């Protein structure tokens, strides 16, 4: 039996599905992942099948960086990504799904898989990394209306759903014409039902952060984060081991795909100044920008990559953009965090970390200064109550197994 998973975006949008795919493979299934071509070397060493789609993930992230927490601009950024390559993406997805038995789509790729599953008459699951199903309990991730009560929350969710549908309906109907399927109507919203039944949903985040709302049906499950236990054959370089051994635990600072080449220089200046002002040692994730700053102080180590599962327990605090994967490892490590959200779901996760009591502060990227960051770094490494709360949450998080829970739910629905 072959599961095919379709995901698009940055590494943070791919790695959780790689973890789910590896878990499915270990449970005895064949697994194929459809995503951007440059992730092939990231996926195939794990023994999973790979199918490429057209489109540059780096260009997509750079576009999304401009939208902040604006839902409308976020949707238009995705439209700009799809439009130039739509015919080829439609063909790539169809080709990648051949020979499949079960299809799994993410919060954004599920729309294209919906028609493929209908045409091929295959079981289909949505597998988002942040909450997108309608509920009265909270507004959507990309907030359209303020959260002033259950009615406003429902209206916000409906506005986002139909905004997506109206903005992309022509695209999806172009795919349906190619598959000889009837076009989607303007109403009702069509993507949550297939063959007259609700599409089953697996959420890849922890119920500790967002418990399942009581108005979500039995077909919706919150499984826990999907994480890799370790990266194969990885050994810490000597420079990293020596730096960790040379002094107290450092502060980790990394903004993932948000730290594009355009953003790198101003962010680096802010973080270096903040570390100096706070008197803390630091590890800065620089990615491919390693040579932009040739003169690093002895108290700072730049790294191009490292498994967060290994690194975070060896640090005093984590400063990050609020990506779901990064914060999941921070939670498991049981250390205080500082959120610097750039766009999209990052603002919601920052709010949830604060509500959970494990975040020293949230500083949206436009408000980030060296002085502010230095102050909250000082809080993160010295506030004993914050550290105790983070350690307690870490113990709870380490008891979760999101991949195993997701596989159990998949098998249950297939039965």
Image (cartoon, rainbow, N blue to C red):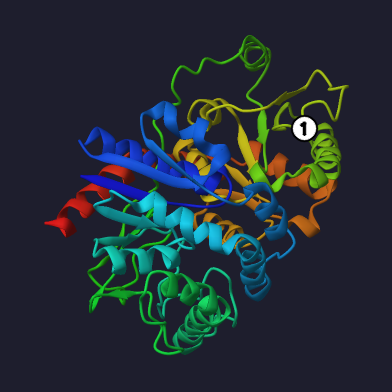
Question: Residue 358 placed where, x, y %?
Answer: 53, 48
Q: In front: 407, or 30?
A: 30
Q: Is residue 378 visible?
A: yes
Q: In front: 37, or 98?
A: 98
Q: In front: 102, or 317?
A: 102
- Which image quadrant: the N terminus? top left
Number of numbered discs overlaid on the protein picture: 1
Q: Quadrant of residue 336?
A: top right
75 lies left or right of 63: left
Mark 1 closeness class: few <14, some 14–19, many ≥20 residues within 10 Å? some
72 lies left or right of 291: left
Picture layout, residue 263 above or below residue 217: above
Q: Residue at x 72, y 40 (%)?
A: 378
Q: Quadrant of residue 212?
A: bottom left
Q: In front: 49, or 192?
A: 49
Question: Residue 99 placed where, x, y %?
Answer: 28, 48
Which type of secondary structure does the marked residue at label 1 adopt? loop
Q: Residue at x 36, y 42 (%)?
A: 32
**Residue extending furthest left?**
415
Q: Is residue 348 visible?
A: no
Residue with the mark numbered 1: 289
Picture layout, residue 315 above or below residue 234: below
Question: Residue 285 placed where, x, y %?
Answer: 68, 32
Question: Residue 147 placed where, x, y %?
Answer: 55, 80
98 lies left or right of 240: left
343 lies left or right of 187: right
Q: Residue at x 62, y 68 (%)?
A: 79
- Which image quadrant: the C terminus? bottom left
Q: Residue at x 53, y 28 (%)?
A: 307
């Amino acid at each position: 039996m072959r599961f095919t998973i379709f995901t698009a975006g940055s590494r943070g949008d791919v790695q959780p599905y790689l973890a789910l795919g590896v878990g499915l493979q270990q449970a005895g299934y064949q697994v194929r992942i459809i995503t951007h071509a440059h992730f092939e070397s990231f996926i195939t060493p794990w023994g999973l099948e790979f199918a490429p789609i057209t489109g540059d993930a780096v260009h997509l992230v750079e576009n999304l960086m401009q939208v902040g927490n604006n839902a409308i601009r976020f949707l238009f950024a995705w439209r700009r990504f799809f439009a130039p390559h739509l015919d080829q993406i439609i063909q790539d997805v169809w080709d990648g799904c051949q020979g499949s038995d079960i299809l799994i789509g993410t919060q954004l790729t599920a729309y294209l898989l919906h028609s493929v599953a209908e045409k091929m008459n295959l079981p289909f699951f949505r597998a988002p990394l942040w909450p997108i199903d309608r509920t009265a309990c909270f507004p959507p991730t990309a907030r359209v209306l303020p959260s002033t009560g259950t009615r406003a929350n429902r209206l916000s969710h409906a506005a986002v759903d139909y905004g997506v549908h109206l903005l992309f309906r022509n695209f999806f109907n172009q795919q349906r014409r190619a598959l000889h399927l009837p076009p989607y109507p303007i109403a009702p919203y069509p993507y949550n039902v297939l063959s007259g039944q609700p599409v089953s949903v697996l959420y890849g985040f922890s119920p500790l952060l967002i418990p399942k709302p009581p108005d979500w049906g039995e077909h919706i499950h919150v499984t826990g984060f999907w994480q890799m236990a370790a990266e194969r054959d990885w050994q810490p370089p000597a420079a990293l081991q020596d730096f960790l051994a040379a002094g107290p635990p450092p502060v980790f600072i990394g903004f993932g795909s948000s730290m594009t080449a355009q953003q790198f220089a101003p962010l680096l200046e802010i973080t270096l100044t903040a570390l100096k002002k706070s008197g803390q040692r630091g590890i800065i994730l620089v990615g491919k920008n390693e040579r932009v700053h040739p003169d690093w102080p002895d108290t700072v180590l730049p790294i191009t990559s490292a498994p967060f599962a290994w690194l975070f327990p060896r640090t005093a605090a984590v400063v990050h953009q609020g990506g779901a994967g990064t914060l999941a490892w921070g939670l498991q490590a049981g250390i205080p965090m500082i959120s610097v959200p750039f766009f999209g779901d990052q603002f919601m996760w920052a709010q949830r970390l604060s509500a959970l009591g494990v975040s020293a502060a949230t500083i949206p990227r436009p408000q980030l200064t060296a002085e502010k960051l230095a102050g909250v770094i000082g809080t993160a490494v010295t506030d004993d109550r914050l550290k105790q709360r983070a350690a307690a949450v870490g113990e709870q998080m380490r008891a979760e197994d999101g991949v195993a829970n997701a596989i159990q739910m998949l098998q249950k629905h297939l039965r």
